[in-house]
């Protein structure tokens, strides 16, 4: 049961990622990315990280992708395909580089084996253990992240503002 | 009976399937009769009778409505983007129903020797799951507005989704007060925490007020329904929808109303707990206790649904900029103050 | 029994898809989406290894990656909107004024 779920989720993640990269219509790509984020959240659940999964959906699929969708719909850039638009040299070079990257990483990584079977402490992936780390060991990055978000908010407001004449 | 109990216990596929079927049956029947209740109560507020022709007191009206809507013609505009046009109501309806998976109808009870948990999925992060599904519901509206290829729909869709994501914030922040007091994200634990002390509506009235106002805005109801108001923007994002797809939007609005009423009952009104009734129930057998608990829960949720309907037909609509001002500049600071208040109360040992 | 090696392999595949997307697409928005793909692949690797070592640090770091991605998406989309207002196109090959 677990193995079937795992392979289905993996397939969903890879297929939706491929649609994002290959489809010509940006709206379809954005929707496919939202589906991809949900499949990654499902992966998180399979990996005993329920809190991370829910945060992924609330933040990423529920807020960031809606923002993307707004911009895509309002700008309406029209579709452009990858066929014939990108130069052949570019295309071949990219595919070669991608193949090399995969060939370098995947065999090494597949050899790590099945260390995922060890039992985890109770409360692993839950809110309490998350919060404990966040507010003690990682307090400084937490505060820095809030300042980063403030800076991003100010930056986005300034950039998108239109002068009212 | 033993086999029935064995089927219902545990979290296997069969038990979950039965619970899901029961849940969908109960929710959809409730939603059908809430549409009737809305029209009757609207009639009483406006000093007229609501529907009373079809069956006694109009009780068969939802059936007639359903049949009529099913036989209407399905119109899809020529220049609409077909895949997303058809997908949008499906997303809205699916997310509205999916959030019900973590709502408990009572405590786990024993039935012919087996323990039955009246909850489809007892997640440790239950409350956040509901928030996540609510944030996924925005997609249906954005896609409906865009794919209709219609200025009014696009405007209505964008306004509505901006409204939804704005009020999600104050809703989640007001929830944090409840979570701090209860100490857990599981909905069953939150109700247990309230049975020990006072209901959270008494302990944090400001939090309840923010939550209920945000819930009105989240379900596009009551004074916050500008994006779908007929006099303002035709019908907003569901202008171009007809027959079954419109039914999905319509139903999902009422499912969300019922969902937020049930959430408010669980989080603020003590769920299935009534203080003086608990002693009386101590002698009863477990299944009977569960039935009484479920009735109490339903009664409280119905009061909140009545409040929804009452507010809708009483208050005038907010203008869009007033709505956004309220969400960002009034409710958000109040929610932060509420968090401070609850934190202080916990320090002082009130919880 | 989740095989961590296979999860990391999937993460590598997703990351590579993201890299391919950045390199061969010409619409700035889709390039942005491919960057999000890469960030998510990294998050998946973090959470998988956090499970393998039974330590929460990986998930906390994935949370920070999400926060940074949110900030980056906001500012990046604002930049794209600002550029679009001038040129009425999101084609990355046209934003080439600094090229010789």
Image (cartoon, rainbow, N blue to C red):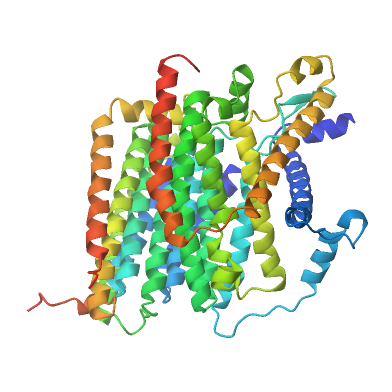
> Which is more toward the observer, B264 or C70?
B264
> Which is more toward the observer, B307 or B179?
B307
Q: Determine the residue located farthest toward the right in the rendered image.
A: B56
Residue at 29% over, 66% down: C22
Write down the quadrant of residue A142 in the picture. Answer: top left
Residue C32: percent from left, percent from top: 31, 64
Write down the quadrant of residue A130 in the picture. Answer: top left
Residue at 77% over, 70% down: B69
Residue at 23% over, 42% down: A147
Q: Determine the residue located farthest toward the front in the rendered image.
A: B47
Residue B334 is at least partly visible in this image? yes
On screen, residue B117 above or below B68: above
B289 vs B342, left or right, is: right
Residue at 39% over, 60% down: A67
B127 vs B93, left or right, is: left
Residue A57: percent from left, percent from top: 47, 49
Residue A27: percent from left, percent from top: 44, 71
């Amino acid at each position: 049961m677990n193995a079937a779920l795992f392979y289905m989720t993996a397939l969903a993640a890879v297929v939706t990622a491929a649609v994002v990269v290959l489809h010509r219509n940006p709206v379809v790509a954005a929707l496919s990315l939202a589906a991809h984020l949900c499949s990654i959240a499902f992966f998180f659940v399979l990996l005993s990280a329920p809190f991370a999964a829910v945060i992924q959906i609330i933040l990423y699929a529920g807020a960031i992708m809606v923002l993307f969708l707004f911009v895509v719909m309002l700008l309406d850039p029209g579709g452009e395909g990858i066929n014939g638009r990108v130069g052949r040299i570019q295309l071949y070079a990219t595919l070669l580089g991608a193949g090399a990257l995969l060939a370098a990483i995947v065999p090494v990584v597949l050899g790590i084996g099945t260390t995922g079977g060890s039992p985890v402490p109770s409360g692993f992936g839950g809110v309490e253990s998350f919060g404990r780390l966040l507010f003690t060991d990682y307090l400084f990055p937490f505060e820095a992240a809030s300042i980063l978000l403030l800076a991003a908010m100010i930056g986005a407001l300034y950039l998108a503002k239109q002068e009212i004449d | 009976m033993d086999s029935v109990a064995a089927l219902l216990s545990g979290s296997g596929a069969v038990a979950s399937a039965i619970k899901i079927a029961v849940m969908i049956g109960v929710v959809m029947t409730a939603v059908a009769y809430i549409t009737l209740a809305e029209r009757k109560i609207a009639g009483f507020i406006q000093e007229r009778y609501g529907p009373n022709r079809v069956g006694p007191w109009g009780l068969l009206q939802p059936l007639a409505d359903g049949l009529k809507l099913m036989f209407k013609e399905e119109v899809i505009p020529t220049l609409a983007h077909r895949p997303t046009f058809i997908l949008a109501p499906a997303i809205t309806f699916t997310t509205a129903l999916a959030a019900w998976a973590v709502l408990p109808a009572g405590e786990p009870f024993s039935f012919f020797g087996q323990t039955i948990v009246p909850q489809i999925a007892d997640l440790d992060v239950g409350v956040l799951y509901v928030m996540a599904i609510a944030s996924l519901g925005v997609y249906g509206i954005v896609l409906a507005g865009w794919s209709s290829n219609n200025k009014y729909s696009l405007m209505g869709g964008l306004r509505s989704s901006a409204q939804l994501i704005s009020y999600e914030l104050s809703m989640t922040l007001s929830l944090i007060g409840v979570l701090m007091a209860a100490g857990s994200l599981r909905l069953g634990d939150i109700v247990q925490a309230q049975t020990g002390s006072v209901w959270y509506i008494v302990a944090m009235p400001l939090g309840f007020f923010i939550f209920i106002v945000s819930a009105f805005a989240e379900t596009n109801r009551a004074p916050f329904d500008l994006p779908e108001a007929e006099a303002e923007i035709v019908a907003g994002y569901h202008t171009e929808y007809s027959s079954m797809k419109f039914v999905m939007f319509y139903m999902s609005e009422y499912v969300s109303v019922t969902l937020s009423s049930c959430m408010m009952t669980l989080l603020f009104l003590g769920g299935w707990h009534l203080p003086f009734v608990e002693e009386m129930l101590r002698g009863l057998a477990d299944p009977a206790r569960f039935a009484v608990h479920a009735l109490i829960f339903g009664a409280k949720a119905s009061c909140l649904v009545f409040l929804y309907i009452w507010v809708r037909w009483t208050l005038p609509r907010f203008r869009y900029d007033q709505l956004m001002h309220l969400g960002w500049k009034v409710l958000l600071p109040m929610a932060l103050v509420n968090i401070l208040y609850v934190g202080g109360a916990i320090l002082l040992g009130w919880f | 029994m989740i095989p961590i090696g296979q999860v990391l392999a999937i993460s590598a595949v997703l990351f590579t898809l993201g890299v391919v997307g950045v390199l061969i697409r010409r619409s700035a928005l889709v390039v942005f989406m491919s960057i999000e793909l890469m960030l998510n692949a990294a998050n998946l690797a973090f959470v998988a290894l956090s499970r393998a070592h039974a330590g929460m640090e990986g998930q906390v770091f994935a949370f920070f990656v999400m926060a940074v991605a949110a900030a980056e998406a906001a500012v990046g989309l604002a930049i794209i909107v600002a550029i679009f207002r001038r040129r009425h196109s999101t084609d990355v090959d046209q934003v080439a004024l600094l090229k010789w």
